[in-house]
Image (spheres, helix red, strand yellow):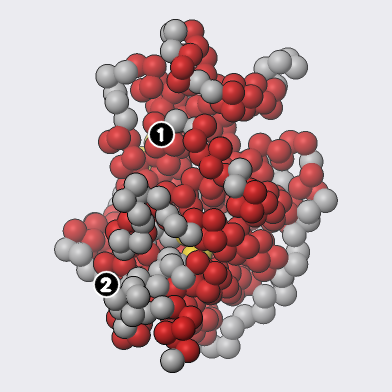
Amino acid sequence: MMLEKLFKLKAHNTTVRTEIIAGITTFLAMAYILFVNPSILGATGMDKGAVFVATCLAAAIGCVLMGLIANYPIALAPGMGLNAFFTYTVVLHMGYTWQIALGAVFLSAVIFFAMSLFKIREWIIASIPLPLRAGIGAGIGLFLALIALEGAGIVVDNPATLVGIGDLTKPGPLLAMLGFVVIVVLEARRVTGAVLIGILLVTFISMGIGLSPFAGVFSAPPSIAPTFMQLDIAGAFNVGLISVIFAFLFVDVFDNTGTLLGVTKRAGLADEQGNVPKMGRALIADSAAALFGSLLGTSTTTSYVESAAGVSAGGRTGLTAIVVAVLFLLALFFSPLASSVPVYATAPALLFVAVLMASGLAEIDWKDITTAAPVTVTALTMPLTYSIANGIAFGFITWTLVKLLSGRAKEVNAALVILSILFVIKLGWLSA
């Protein structure tokens, strides 16, 4: 049987039926990206229909690569946090065009691909302390939370205090809060596709009371032409974008590594030491998917932790990922439904993802002030400066200075010192 030869189902103690169920489970858990990604990237001026198609195709390609190259039950799609960084920091805050931002995604993917081939990734990961990684993850979560609350109209700008509370008597904020509570409750009750259900519930209520128009459910896929091959690689070589490319790369590397370690461990695919046997293959698949994504017209494609839902349903091989790929291709015909989803319906999904990402702070030793201070600076700088790159920069610099001046030089390595100096130069402190 071809599927047996390709995916070694018997060796992994699984069946075609189990893998199909696992693939459907994973897809339902991560399908919210179909509605959230066009909403976020559309704020840059990108055509939402084209982004929807790019999201479906990038996810499908990524899942096929992971399934065939690594034979892992891990699904890929444009990453949360990375899409927010793309839109709100690189384009809206720093002022670069979305074409140049796509070029930066492409370059970061090329570097990631090279790192995966030459095994430089291990050196970089080993050089970044675990607490700092947790702080970066939490900071991205807080950044997403601010974007979610702002998009829902719950948090608004205030000239006196920078931010303030919005008008909670309006239906938008109320529906967003309802959606968030529904998602959390469904997740607590272990309902598959909790995030997707929350988004669709708010959307249908909004349509029902006449707040947002209903564009339909099925249609032929929109044209991908407005974003396909529109990346500006030459523009991405701008010196000011070095830290942006690094941020894309850095977040993607740790996103992927953490997801791969967590999901493969749950699937029983890791060895006794917790190492992932085919980590190199998985990362090559991931970086190649990010390359394709930038060409199609979407932000960085990465492994999804929601793959754990499929693993819990019995997924053990790449056939699970192939099933997810097929479902993403079928989703191409649901573009009218995606265009009908209002911002306050996707905001609860962002806020829920923020909760999951902020949970990494539980791993921090808060009694050690030389650790707690850099982690707090990292996490808070991201939302308050509207930039993941700034958060990483401030975190590295603070960690290096505090540890060195506190007599804890053993907790600082050459990579941290070099990166900290580069960040100081980037922030302009040495040239001021």
Farthest residue to the right: give it.
Answer: 234
* Relative to 214, 65 lies left or right: right
Residue ID for mark 2: 313
Residue depicted at 29% across the width and 76% down the height:
13
The secondary structure type at the circle numbered 2 is loop
Q: Nearer the viewer, residue 190 or 319?
A: 319
Residue 389 seen from this side: yes
Is the N terminus in the top left, top right, bottom left or bottom right quadrant? bottom left
The three-letter code of the residue at mark 2 reads: Ala
Across and down, in percent, residue 200 comes to 35, 72
* Relative to 71, 267 lies left or right: left
Residue depicted at 29% across the width and 23% down the height:
366
Picture quadrant of residue 310: bottom left
Across and down, in percent, residue 269 comes to 35, 61
Farthest residue to the bottom: give it.
Answer: 1
Across and down, in percent, residue 303 comes to 47, 59
Q: Relative to residue 93, is residue 405 depicted above or below?
A: above
Disc 1: CA contacts within 10 A as few (<14), some (14-19) or many (>=20): few
Q: Relative to residue 140, is residue 80 depicted above or below?
A: below
Across and down, in percent, residue 216 comes to 47, 84
Circles 2, 1 touching at the beta carbon (< 8 Å): no
Residue 52 seen from this side: no
- Which mark is on residue 263? none
The secondary structure type at the circle numbered 1 is helix
The three-letter code of the residue at mark 1 reads: Leu
Q: Relative to residue 64, is residue 145 depicted above or below?
A: above
Q: Nearer the viewer, residue 350 or 344?
A: 350
Residue ID for mark 1: 130
Q: Nearer the viewer, residue 103 or 417?
A: 417
Residue depicted at 64% across the width and 53% down the height:
117
The mark nearer the N terminus, 2 or 1, is 1
